[in-house]
Image (cartoon, rainbow, N blue to C red):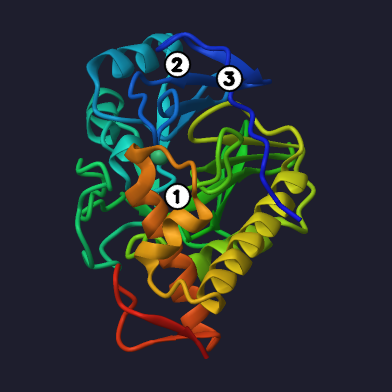
Amino acid sequence: MTHELTFKTTMHFAYDEPAPVSPGIVRIVAENPSPLTFKGTNTYLVGMTELAVIDPGPANEHHLAAIMKAAAGRPIRQIFVTHAHRDHVDGADALKAATGAEILGFGREAFAPVGPETTPQGSEFIDYVFTPDVKLAHGDVVDEKEWRLQALHTPGHAPDHLCFALLGRGVVFSGDHVMAWNTTLVAPPEGNMADYVDSLSLLLPRSDSVFLPGHGGRLDDPQRTVRAYLLHRRWREEQVLDAIRGGVGTIQSIVPVIYPTIDRKLSSAAALSVQAHVEHLIARGLVTCDGSPTWDRPLSLA
Ligand SMILES: [Zn+2]
């Protein structure tokens, strides 16, 4: 039995053109496409007369100009940040300077830099000194006349990741935690598989009707997707266990077994994903390794 997922990889948009996605919500896609950001980062504007921005996106003057144009003179009061990865947060300072808005997010300083600051592709991707004006914790609600947003701490892709539930509307801004175009990257040390699984489980009992993700198009059946992603991770974990049981004893050798057709550009991301599974299996006492599980250190069943 396989649990290969089907993804929604069509997306109708034009870069930096505002598009309504739900009443009182407009999406603007930044032009920073890549294998990990899909078509680019989604910035959302929430509200009718006064606006909040969810994820200002990368530092890019065209994108900033597009946000200001879409606001059309309406004040932007808040800038919410889902997580301090550069494709989401780097535009915050310029947008704040242009609008006077306050920046809200989990904050990053609680998580000291623990690993390389670069993606598997080699570019910088974490703003380790991101300090919002207002720190949000799990469950915090920001209450405005036209909307109420609740922060949901959802680590896994990033330790500081927040989703934002638009209360009373059945809409969740799901950031990079749950997307329709692909599953998120869980790459240690930034990513943590146990956290990711817990953060998926957190969303499961909710009854939202739409997720608006940080990349790609909307999810119209979010609970079903969350359930499928949980099953998919369990299936991947079984594959990792099977490989180790069959004598494929290092992360390096497991990668081609469970990702036989992986694009070379993504093979180091795949290796990190396997590492995340291995760490999760070790933490639960199912696999052992003499030391931390590096690329070529032997693994065995516990
Ligand atoms: Zn992202």
Q: Position of residue 150 (x, y in %)?
A: 59, 50
Residue in the picture at 20% in, 43% down: 122
Front in this rendered view, residue 35 or 102: 35
**Residue located at (41% from left, 35% from top):** 55
Q: Amino acid at mark 2?
A: Arg
Q: Is residue 192 visible?
A: no
Q: Which mark is residue 48?
A: 3
Name the residue carrying label 2: 74
Q: Nearer the viewer, mark 1 or mark 2?
A: 1
CA distance separating discs 1 and 2: 36 Å
Classify residue 207 as left or right of residue 297: right
- Give the residue drawn at x 35%, y 18%: 31
Q: Which quadrant of the figure contains the N terminus? A: bottom right
Q: Is residue 227 above or below residue 45?
A: below
Q: Identify the amino acid type marked 3.
A: Met
Residue 277 is left or right of residue 99, and the answer is: right
